[in-house]
Image: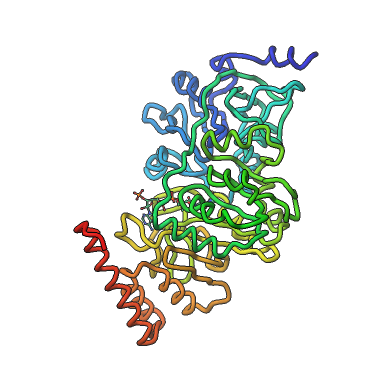
Amino acid sequence: MDWKEIYKSKLVTAEEAIKSIKDGDKVVTGMGCGEPFGIEKALVEHYKEFNNIEIISMLTLGDSPWCQPEMKGHFTLNSLFASTSNRKAISTGISEFTTSHFYEIPDIIENYICPRVTIVMVSPPDEHGYVSFGTTVDYTKGTTDYCEVVIAQVNKYMPRTFGNNKHIRDFTYFVEIDEPLPEVKSVEISEVEMKIGKNCASLIKDGDCLQLGIGGIPNAVCAQLKDKKDLGLHSELVGDGVVDLLESGVINNKKKQTNKGRTILGAAFGSQKLNNYINNNPSVEIHPIDYVNNPIEIAKNDNMVSVNSCLQVDLLGQVVSDTVGLNQFSAVGGQVDFVRGATMSHGGRSIIAMPSTAKKGMISRIVPLITEGSAVTTPRNDVNYVVTEYGIAQLKGKTLKERAKALIKISHPRFRPHLIIEFKKRFNEDPFTREEIKEVIEDVKEQIVDDIKNKLNIGS
Ligand code: COA
C-alpha cells in the first residue's frame, strides 16, 4: 500500500486514539517542546473514563494537569524531572518522582518502568512517509521502538530535524493537531550572570567542544564566546544562546573527533529562533539521549567542556543541583553524564557555575554542610572547576583544606567570615594568613558599604 494510504488509515481523532489506553496502563509522553499537549488535553477532558493510569514524563513546560486533586485514582504522574508545575505535587506525595542519570533514562523506561503506550509529537510526513521527532528525540524516539501502542500528534509547527526520523508504518495512530510549540524565551542576562559567564569563558579555549545547559548562566557563557574560534557543540539540551554562535561560525564543529562538522543534541529547548535554526538544517542532528549523554560517547571528543549549574556546594566540593532539603527541585538530568564525559575526554574540563548567593542574596550557596535532606548530585570526586561571580575554584587534586580555601575565596564576601569560622572548627586551623584575612575583611567592608548604598539607592 502507498504510504499515504497507510497514513490515512491510521489518522484518527484524539478521542479515538486514547480509547486504546486501558485501565492500569503505563503511558510515557514526550517532554519539553515536544510534549503532545493536544492529545494530553483529550485525556484530561475524559479523565473519568480512565482508572489507575501512570503518566511517565520528564521536563514539562506545561501545567501538569495530572497533579490536580480530581485526577486522583485516574492519573498519577511519575516525573523524571521536577518542574514549576509539579514540584509541589512531588513534595507532597501526590505525584511520584523517579531519579536517574539522563543517559540511563531510555533503559530505565524500557526495561524497568515498561510502559505499554507512548504518546509523542512529530512533524508532518515528508514525501517518503517519514516523520521527524523535531525538537525532542531524547527518550521519546526510543519509546516508539518498543511500546505496543504508539500514538503521535502530527503538528505542522514541529520543526523537521535530522538524525532520527521514522516511517509512518511504525506508528499505531496519528492525530493531526497543529499548535505552536511551547517556547523557552531567553531572559535578560543579569550583572552577576555576566560575571559568571566571563569567568567560565576564561576556561574555554579555541577548538573546545561544549556542553551547555539552558537558562541564564549558559546564555551568559554564550555571550562571552563571540571571539572564540572553531568551537564544537555536543550537548544534551540547548537554548537560544547558541544560535548566534552557530550562525556566525564560532561553533563550526570542525575540531570534533566524532560527528565532525555537525552539532549533536538530545533536545532543543528554545524559542522559535532556535526552532527556525534547527528546521531542515543538516548541520544539526538530534539523537536519543542514551547516545548523546553516554559519557563514553561524550569523551570521544577531545577538549570537551561541560558547563552546568547548581544550588549548593559544600566546603568539600559536594554539589547539590536538584534538591533543596527534602524537596525535589529539578533532577540530575545530564549533569553527571557530562561531568564524567568531560573528565574522561582528552584535555576535557567540567565547570559547575552558580551565583554565590540565592534568595536575593540572603543565603550563601557555598556552605559548610549541605542542607539536611538534600541529595548530592555531583560527588566531590567528580568535581573539577566551580565558578561564581567572584572567581574560579579548581578542586581536582586538592586536599580537603585546599578545596575549602578555594571555595571560600569565591564565596560572597558577606558570608566569608562565617565560612572561615566553620573551616577553623572543622580543620582546627586558620584557613588564611593574617594578611589574607585582612583582605577578606576589606572585601566584607566594601560589600557592606555597597549593600547600604543599594538599600538607600544612592549609587556610587
Ligand atoms: N537553597 C535554597 N534555595 C535555593 C538555593 C539554595 N541553596 N539555591 C537556589 N535556590 C533557589 C533560588 O533562589 C531560586 O528561587 P527564587 O526563584 O525563589 O529566587 C530557585 O532556587 C532556582 O535557583 P536558580 O539558581 O535561579 O535556578 P536555575 O533556574 O538557574 O537552575 C539548577 C539551576 C541547578 C536548578 C538547574 O540548572 C538544574 O536543575 N540542574 C540540574 C540538571 C542539570 O544540570 N542538567 C544538565 C544541563 S540541562
Q: Residue furthest right?
A: 1
Q: Residue at x 56, y 29 (%)?
A: 25
Residue 223 percent coordinates (x, y): 51, 52
Q: Residue at x 34, y 77 (%)?
A: 440
Residue 243 vs 424, above or below: the answer is above
Residue 94 percent coordinates (x, y): 40, 38
Query: Does residue 41 appear anywhere in the picture?
Result: yes
Residue 75 percent coordinates (x, y): 47, 29
Total marks shown come to 0
Q: Residue at x 73, y 52 (%)?
A: 254
Is 315 situated left or right of 114 in this image? Answer: left
Q: Nearer the viewer, residue 227 or 18?
A: 227
Residue 78 vs 451, above or below: the answer is above
**How has the structure been colored for display?**
rainbow
Residue 406 percent coordinates (x, y): 46, 74
Q: Residue furthest left?
A: 456
